[in-house]
Amino acid sequence: MTIRVLLADDHALVRTGFRVILEMEDDITVVGEASDGAQATDLALSLRPDVVLMDVEMPGVDGLEATRRIAAAGGPSVLILTTFDRDDYLFAALQAGASGFLLKNGTPEALTEAVRVIAAGDALLAPAVTRRVIAGFTAPRQRTPEPVVRLDELTPREHEVLVLLAGGATNAEIATGLRLGETTVKTHVSRVLMKLGARDRTQAVVLAYELGVVRPSQG
């Protein structure tokens, strides 16, 4: 199966560099390019790629707003790629519905692996920012009634799975920790996402911290 990728960046040279890196891989192809957020949204919804590589700072509609629009329309998964290692971008990206966040100073291998992870339906954060995601939820945050109701719908086992997810555990690690088969774990994870109304694992982790299911000392 070939992973179809849309590139969104206002710098043509950056898009060219990403295209060269990605298309060196046998299982990845670039199906389109956008130079601003509005174009990225239109192409994401018309081309339906598996992954959108989204820059943050673009003219007109920026990458964060484009991500919100794509997520709201039920579009493809978005991987935010930015030069700027800023917490406000990180949290805004997660809240907008992004499935991952990487810095542009990473390696080509990290980029291609991130695309594969996101395309597989998982979520990914650059290791350099993961600790800040946890720390960012130390302070009380506004909670909406809807997620609290959905949280109450989790079974005790699903609650355990959510706690382990929030700690960064993979399906294999959850299976080992709870002495379950990986297929069973995948089913539990899917049900957790559905009940929380989360697009993916990253959004489930965000909700877990916002709702107090886990606290930074547990992660």
Image (cartoon, grey):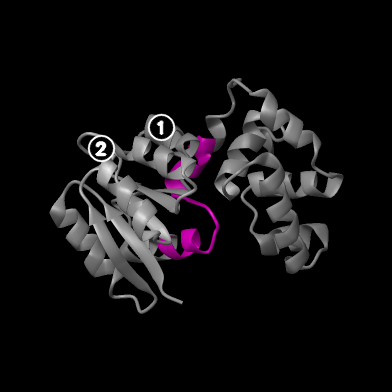
Q: Amino acid at mark 2?
A: Glu
Q: Which residue is mark 2?
A: 57
Q: Amino acid at mark 1?
A: Asp
Of residues 151 and 172, which is closer to you in this image?
151
Asked whether, in this view, residue 141 is left or right of residue 88, the answer is: right
Q: Is residue 134 above or below residue 144?
A: below
Q: Secondary structure at mark 2?
A: loop
Q: Is residue 46 above or below residue 172?
A: above
Q: Which residue is mark 1?
A: 87
Asked whether, in this view, residue 65 is left or right of residue 206, the answer is: left
- Which is more foreground, mark 2 or mark 1? 2
On the image, the x and y values in percent for residue 61 come to 27, 35
Image mark for residue 109: none
Q: Secondary structure at mark 1?
A: helix
Crowd around label 1: few <14 · some 14–19 · many ≥20 (10 Å):
few
Asked whether, in this view, residue 185 is left or right of residue 107, the answer is: right
| Region of the chain picked out in magenta, as a range | 115-133
On the image, the x and y values in percent for residue 180 come to 81, 64
Q: Does the magenta run of residues contain 132?
A: yes
On the image, the x and y values in percent for residue 212 come to 70, 29
At x 26% / y 46%, what residue is drawn? 39
Q: Does the magenta run of residues contain 185?
A: no
- The quarter of the displayed image where residue 172 is located: bottom right
At x 19% / y 55%, what residue is drawn? 14
Q: Is residue 212 visible?
A: no
The quadrant the C terminus occupies is top right
